[in-house]
């Protein structure tokens, strides 16, 4: 029996690539709908009740992980496969806790992604308890402030870092080729994840972490006697 699939990604080329790969495969998968936003996806899922939803982590009007959480709560028979351009342990943990069956980088080969989807179609859950335990162990080894950032998606992390540089929402929007409203949405979400109330708190944390990383780089480049470690010798050295 064929498993029905809904594709959710705001990039048409990604959806087209996935659809083509699925249609050419022999995995017993049938695409029954495509959406580019959380709103479109919710409507498609409610109407079609697909077996599998393949969803991007970052969507124009919301968060793919939150969508996954809502889908798994309302439709337990529907499995979610999350795709991301920036795989991160924190986001993977959030995906696992949201009930996702799998979390895969978009830079994976079409064969690998199809293999993941096919496994999920067979009832397997690739983000199992063991994976969650391993992720928690990784995160527990990080300094507390750095570990908190692992909750952020790749785009939220970039907005956070630009906040630390003192850029306004408008300037961040220009730098990342986003609308100012989208940047405000990212800012609100990252403040919630970091349990902060004010933008200035996030900017201060971002600046502090940047300074800490800069100091660590300096320490790494200085030898035990306080003298900078020499670089590679030039042609005449």
Image (cartoon, grey):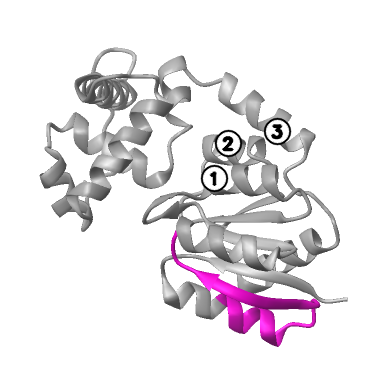
**Quarter of the figure that contains the N terminus:** bottom right
Q: Secondary structure at mark 3?
A: helix
Residue 65 circle label: 1
Labels 3 and 1: the sequence-earlier one: 1
Q: Position of residue 220 (x, y in %)?
A: 34, 25
Q: Secondary structure at mark 1?
A: helix
Q: Quadrant of residue 55?
A: bottom right
Q: Is residue 83 above or below residue 156?
A: below
- The answer to whether residue 231 is seen in the rendering is no
| Whether label 2 touches label 1, CB < 8 Å | yes
Q: Secondary structure at mark 2?
A: helix
Residue carrying label 2: 94
The stretch in magenta equals 18-37
- Near mark 3 (Cα within 10 A), the count class, few <14, some 14-19 or many ≥20, is some
- Which residue occupies the foreground of this view, 69 or 227? 69
Closer to viewer: mark 2 or mark 1: 1
Q: Position of residue 45 (x, y in %)?
A: 62, 62
Residue 131 left/right relative to 34: right
Labels 3 and 2: the sequence-earlier one: 2
Identify the residue at image location x=35%, y=41%.
156
- Find the residue positioned furthest to the top: 225
Identify the residue at image location x=48%, y=32%.
151
Closer to viewer: mark 3 or mark 1: 1
Residue carrying label 3: 132
State how far apart marks 2 and 1 are (Cα). Answer: 7 Å
Q: Position of residue 161 (x, y in %)?
A: 26, 35
Identify the residue at image location x=26%, y=33%.
230
Q: Is residue 49 above or below residue 170?
A: below
Residue 147 circle label: none
Q: Is residue 127 above or below residue 228?
A: below
Is 81 colored magenta in this rendering? no
Number of callouts = 3
């Amino acid at each position: 029996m064929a498993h029905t699939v809904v594709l959710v990604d705001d990039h048409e080329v990604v959806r087209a690539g996935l659809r083509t790969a699925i249609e050419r495969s022999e995995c017993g998968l049938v695409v029954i709908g495509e959406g580019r936003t959380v709103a479109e996806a919710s409507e498609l899922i409610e109407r079609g009740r697909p077996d599998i939803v393949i969803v991007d982590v970052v969507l124009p009007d919301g968060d793919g992980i939150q969508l996954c959480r809502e889908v798994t709560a309302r439709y337990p028979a529907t499995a979610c496969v999350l795709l991301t351009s920036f795989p991160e342990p924190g986001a993977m943990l959030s995906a696992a806790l949201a009930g996702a069956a799998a979390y895969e980088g978009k830079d994976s080969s079409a064969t690998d992604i199809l293999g993941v989807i096919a496994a999920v179609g067979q009832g397997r859950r690739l983000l199992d308890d063991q994976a969650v335990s391993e992720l928690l162990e990784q995160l527990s080894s990080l300094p507390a402030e750095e570990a908190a950032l692992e909750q952020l998606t790749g785009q939220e992390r970039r907005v956070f870092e630009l906040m630390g540089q003192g850029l306004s929402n408008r300037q961040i929007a220009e730098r990342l080729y986003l609308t100012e409203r989208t940047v405000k949405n990212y800012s609100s979400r990252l403040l919630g994840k970091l349990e902060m109330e004010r933008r200035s708190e996030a900017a201060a944390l971002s600046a502090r972490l940047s300074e800490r990383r800069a100091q660590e780089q300096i320490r790494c480049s200085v030898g035990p006697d306080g003298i900078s470690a020499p670089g590679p010798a030039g042609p005449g050295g």
